[in-house]
Structure formats: C-alpha cells, structure tokens
Image (cartoon, rainbow, N blue to C red):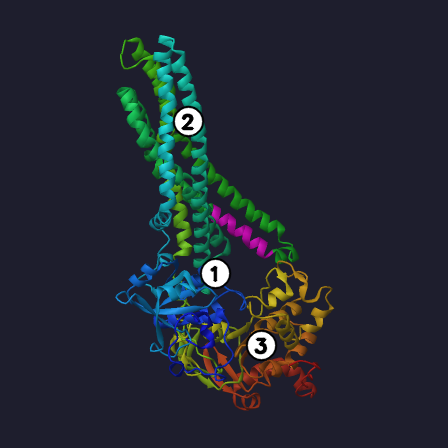
Amino acid sequence: MQRASSASLAAVPAPDPAAAGSGEGAAPAAPSPLEVRLLALVAAARFHGIELDREDLRVPEDEAPAPAVLVGWMQAAGLWARAVRMRWRSLLAIKAGGPVVLLLNDGSAALMVRADPARNVVWLRDPQAVNDEQVVAVDELRLSRVWGGEAVLVRRERGVTFEDEPFTFAWLGRMVWLEKVVLRDVVLGSIVLSILAIAPPMLVMVVLDKVITYQSMSTLTLIALFLVAAAFYEAYLGYIRRRLIQIVATRLDAKLGLHIFRRLLGLPIDYFERNQTGAILFKLGQISKVRDFMTGRLLTTMLDFVTLAVMVPVLFWINVPLTWMVIGAAGCVALIIVAFMPAVRAAFGRWLDAEVARNNIMVETVHGIRTVKSLALEPQQREIWDQRVAEASSRKQALGDISNWPQTLVVPFETFMTRGVLMVGAYMALQGDLTTSVGALFAFMMLSGRVSQPLVSMARLVEDLEETRMAVGLAASVLNNRPETSNPGAGLRPRFEGAISFKGVDFTYPGSRNPALVDISFEVPAGTMLGLVGRSGSGKSTITRLLQGINREYEGSIKIDTTDLREINLAHLRRSFGVVLQDNFLFRGTIRENLLAGRPGLTITDAVRAARLAGAEEFIERLPQGYETQIEEGSPNLSGGQKQRLAIARALIHDPRLLILDEATSALDPESEALVNANIHRIAHGRSMLIVSHRLSSLVDCHQILVLDQGRMVDIGPHKELLERCSVYRQLWLQQHRHMESSGMGKPASPKPVLAQGD
C-alpha cells in the first residue's frame, strides 16, 4: 500500500515494502486518484469474469465521474452494481462474495476483499496489486481518516435483469412499485386529506341540525375556527401531495425514456432495414399514452381508492340506502363500459393501422424530400397522402361513433348519482325517516360528490386500461425484438493487428432463399490492402457486414488475427473498425463535433490530423468558421464530396487498425477522388484496409483483390495476376477501360500525392 497509486491510504498501515514491490526511485510516475478508482472497478469486474472497457465510460479522461456514472458503466457491461453509503458495522457484515470498491475521499479507491468481525478489521487491497496476498488489515479508526462511507457493491447478474425483461404491463407495474417509498407518503397524505374532507360536511350537518336549532353562537364560532384551520392544513397537505406526485411522475417519465432509448439502440441494424421508419416512430410514439396513463390516470386512481376507503364507510354511517344507490349507479356505468369494450377495441385497432400507414407516408416524404422536389412528385405524394388521411379519418369517425354509445348511456346513471340521490333523500326526509335529517342530507350530498366522481373514474379506468394495453402492445412490438447482444459486456477485447481469415463461410439473409455468401475462404495478413470487386449483388458489402458483426448468423469461421469473431466483444470490435459508406450521415452540429463524435478524450489536434489524412483539411480551412462551421440537418451546406471526405476523416479519428471503405469514393468528384486515392497509401499505413469499389482503377495498388460472383469466391490475388488468370476480373476491367485499350492509352497514371505536410 506504499505505492504511489495508494497515496490516499497514507493513514492506513502498509504491508512490507518488499512484498509490495516498492522502493525509492523504483516506482514509475504515480497514477492519478481517478486512474486508481477506475483500476479498482476494473479489478472488481474482472473478479466476476467481466472486462470493463474505458471507451464505454462516456466522460472525459480528466473528469471525475460520479458514483452513479460508475455504476452505469458496470451495469452496461452486464454486472449488477449499486452505489451505497455504508457505516463500519454494515461493512463488517458483508459476506465474501467478491471485492467491494471503497471510494476514498481523495478520489481514489481501495478494494475490500474480506471482513473479520471477530477482530473488528477489514482487509484492503491496492487496486494495482498483483494478487490478493498483498492486503492489509485496517480498523475503523484508520479507515475513517480516508473513507467517508461511499462504496460500490458489485456482483454478477442473476438471471434476466429488470431492464432486459420484456416490455409488458407487468414490467410497467414493477417499475411503478420501485417508487413505493414516495408512493407510501402520497397515500398517507391522501388518507389525511380524505379525513379532513369529511370534517366540513359533518360540521355542516351539526350547524344545520344543532346550531341553528338551539341558536348556539359559541358553537358556531368554534366550528368556524376549526374550518379555517382545516382549510389551511388541507391546502398545505395538498401542496405536499402534488409535489410528491410530480416527483414520482418525473422519475417514471425519465426511467421510461431512458429504458426505451437503450432498448432501441440495442436492436440490430437489420431490424431497421426490414421495417419502415414511420411505423417504428409511430409505435414508439404510443409510449406517450403509456407515460400519461402511468403518471396521470394510474396515480389518480390509486388516490381514488384511498378516498373511497375513507369516505364510503362514512356514507354508510350517514345513510345506508342512499350509499347503495350511489354504488349501484357506479356499477351500472362500469357494466356499460365493459359491454362495449370489444367493439371499441376492434375499432381502435383499425384506426391505429390507418395511422401507421399515414405516418409512414409523412416520414418517407420528409426523408426523401429532395427526390420528391427534383422529380416533381408533389402531386403523386399529395394523392397518396389524401388517401391515407381519408382512410384514417373514416376509421377515426367509426371509432368515435362506437365510443359515443357508452358515453351516452352512462349519462343517466351519472345524473342519478348527484340529482337523483338528492331527490330520493328529500323524499325519505319528508316521509319521516329519522336517519335522514336536513343536515344529514346536506352532509351526504357533499360527501357523495367526492365519492361519485372517483367511482365513475374507476369505472372508466377499464376503457383507459384497454387503450393503454394496445399502446403497450405497439411499443412492445418494437422493444421486445431480440437485441443485438444479450450481454453487452461479454466477449474478448483483444488488441488487433489486422489479419483477417474466412474459412468456409456461408450466409443467407433472414427471409431470403438465395444465399448471399457460399463457401468463402481466404486469409490476408495484417497491414494488407484488400480490394473487393464483383458485380452488384455478388456479396462484397455482405463480407464487410459480417466483419463488423452486423450479421452474426453465419456458418463457418471468421477470425481477426487468431480470435474468432463471435468471441469478441461487439462494441470493442466496432470501435476497432473505421467504416466509410457510400452514403454517410453527418449529425447536426459543428464539423469539429462530427469528427470527434463519441471520442471524449480526443482534441482538435486529432481532428486536424484526421482531416489532413482524408484530404478534407483544404476545404475546411476555406470555410468562414473552419472547424466550427455548423452542419445543418441533412448537410445541405456541404457537397457530396465534402461530406464523404469528412466521413473518411471521422473514421480515421481514432487511428483504427482496420478500415473499411465501402464505395467510399463513389460520391466524390474526380478531383476529390484523385485526392483521396493519392493518399490511400498514407491512410493504409499501419492498418489493414478493405476497399469495396466498382471502379477497378482505384484498386490496382491493393496488395490483394478478392473477386466475387453470385456470392462465391472466384479468385484472389494482385491486379496483374488477376488480369491474366481470372476471366471475371478481366471482363470487368475491360468493360470499364475498353476506351483506353482501343486508343492505346494503356493504364492511366496514378495521381501523385498532393500533401506537402502531415504525419
């Protein structure tokens, strides 16, 4: 513990320096407290068989993350983790199930490997220690000098985590139950408010039956003072209850939003490729109804139960027959709603289908607005939109017609619960019913008004539940799809050199009968520039998808270096690749923010280096604001070539060991393409590259060129050898360069590098 990384434990007795391997002048530069804290978490995770990746911790390297951020880091890797504040007694009571991370006051951490209640000590280990033998016993007094009680408990997840369970009504109910502490306070406040609500009607009954009869001014004054005090207390409690309800609603809203976005990001790419964007967005938009129900109607109904539990017995005490009439009328309302529910459900489903179709047209038109404008397709799109709107409106009208019937039929029963009960009570009083005095009738009407509305609301809850159930079903049809990986933290995180090996790889896209790849086998060493050529549909892009882990249901073996692709952590695999597609997406923001997206540890210097390597520096510096130039949505202020060069720079920003260029130069103008091709060797230095291109002239300098035809490997070799022995490659070459062959121009000269500076 005398090592520099454990300086915060200076107050803790250290083990023998020789055992710790320390000595004056022998230790390297001391790591920062933050690095020691991260090392402690990594060591705790490694104990449970999980490797944490610093890239998953989305904070700058010099910024101290909060305990909640550290817990989220570990949970994202597939561990159960919780940040707690503990006392010494609780620390001693922990049974050995793995190390506990103690967050020390100076920002570093130590690992508690075991506790010894008999000796009243705990055993701590330096996070940098080589093994568990380098531990030290610490008592309460010495630990309190460097530790304030913050700790992170870690263990492996047992079974399916709550976040990974299917999105259902039961799951929503469990999420609400997690707020039981605040809900308990809300219920207690509601009980008190319900009791206070009983007091005014009862006092009104006393005033009418006693005070007026006996002309007692002192009693009236006392009652008035009590009513004023109760009004102020009720207002205060009402404020507190509304505040608590808002807290619960905000928490549920935040948790639901975070969960949905996390599940959405976890879906595989092919799900988004197979489903329309408009349908996905509409179905996820139904979450708003679920959220409104949970944070509004559900909480209100819970409070209605409390109100009924307090007030209904009082109503029975005042007048039993009238109370049964109120309850009976509410029951009739519920029966009418339930009877019409199947028809309403069917009409609601038909309307939702029409809304999905209409939303698809809207989203598709917005995404393809340039094509619509350039081809003058506005009349056709308006016609299609008009049809979808007409169909949705018709089904909405049909839903309204069916829903109108139960709303109409319940009106007489709701009216009876207010005016009808008053008439019956007055009749009973005129008949000489001793339990129905004028004061009692007034009190009953005041209380029944507070009871009848919750009864009707509870009866209508069935209708709201049905609508919410369908909304949950629509959202679940998206969220409950199989995620890309069941355990994001699982898998190896090797350091790649870049060797690629395919052995007997067969692959067929889901839902397709024709295989995309058939018995593909090849090997290329690290640092190879590999070109992929073939006619459209020959499987070039499929190979790059398999390498990125986008599709993992293949047969055969794919290895990077000596590691099987399926055994590599998916996030680590993709971070190790730099990928440039034919059509790249730039986020709304500055050029600098786009280049550094997802890389919090990098700086503008890295952005400049990547832009220079991609040939983008020259046009960025000509922009008025340079790297701070704002990119609008859809990148309308950039040309296709500029967008493509920025995409190449973004792929190079983290210096990947493997780089995929999938038709990356197809959108470039000749000058830009010549600029990028001239720097290909500079870009490829120290890394493996896969270049997919229909322009064979851009592949002539590749070390190896893989020729594909109808999903099968035809040949692999350098350009000159393929021209001699591969008929498919020779035919593709002649198709693109016949004009040069006929004119005797021969092979076009490669452009010379235009960069006079750079790394």
Residue type beneath disc 3: His
Q: Is residue 739 left or right of residue 559?
A: right
The picture places residue 503, in percent across and down from the top left corner, at 40, 82
Residue 386: percent from the left, percent from the top?
A: 55, 44
Question: Residue sitting at 34 percent across and 50 percent down?
Answer: 174
Quadrant containing the C terminus is: bottom right
| Callout 2 amino acid | Ala
Q: How many marks?
A: 3
Left or right: residue 231 compared with residue 88: right
| Residue that numbered label 2 is attached to | 230
Is 125 located above or below residue 702 in the figure?
above
Q: Which is nearer the N-term, disc 3 or disc 2?
A: 2
Asked if marks 3 and 2 touch (Cβ < 8 Å), the reply is no
Split into 4 quadrants, where in the image is the N terminus? bottom left
Task: Please say if the residues under marks 1 and 2 sit with CB atoms less than 8 Å apart.
Answer: no
Q: Is residue 3 above or below residue 199?
A: below
Dot 2 lies on which element? Answer: helix
Amino acid under label 1? Answer: Ala
Nearer to us in this view, 232 or 671: 232
Q: Which residues are magenta?
A: 355-368
Foreground: 209 or 179?
A: 209
Residue of label 1? 66
Camera sees residue 490? no
What whole-number distance in Å separates the C-alpha atoms at marks 1 and 2? 45 Å
Residue pictured at 46% horizontal, 40% vertical: 243
* Badge 2 density bin: few <14, some 14–19, many ≥20, Cα 10 Å: some
Q: Quick check: 24 left or right of 618? A: left
- For mark 3, what is the residue? 694
Discs 3/1, front: 1
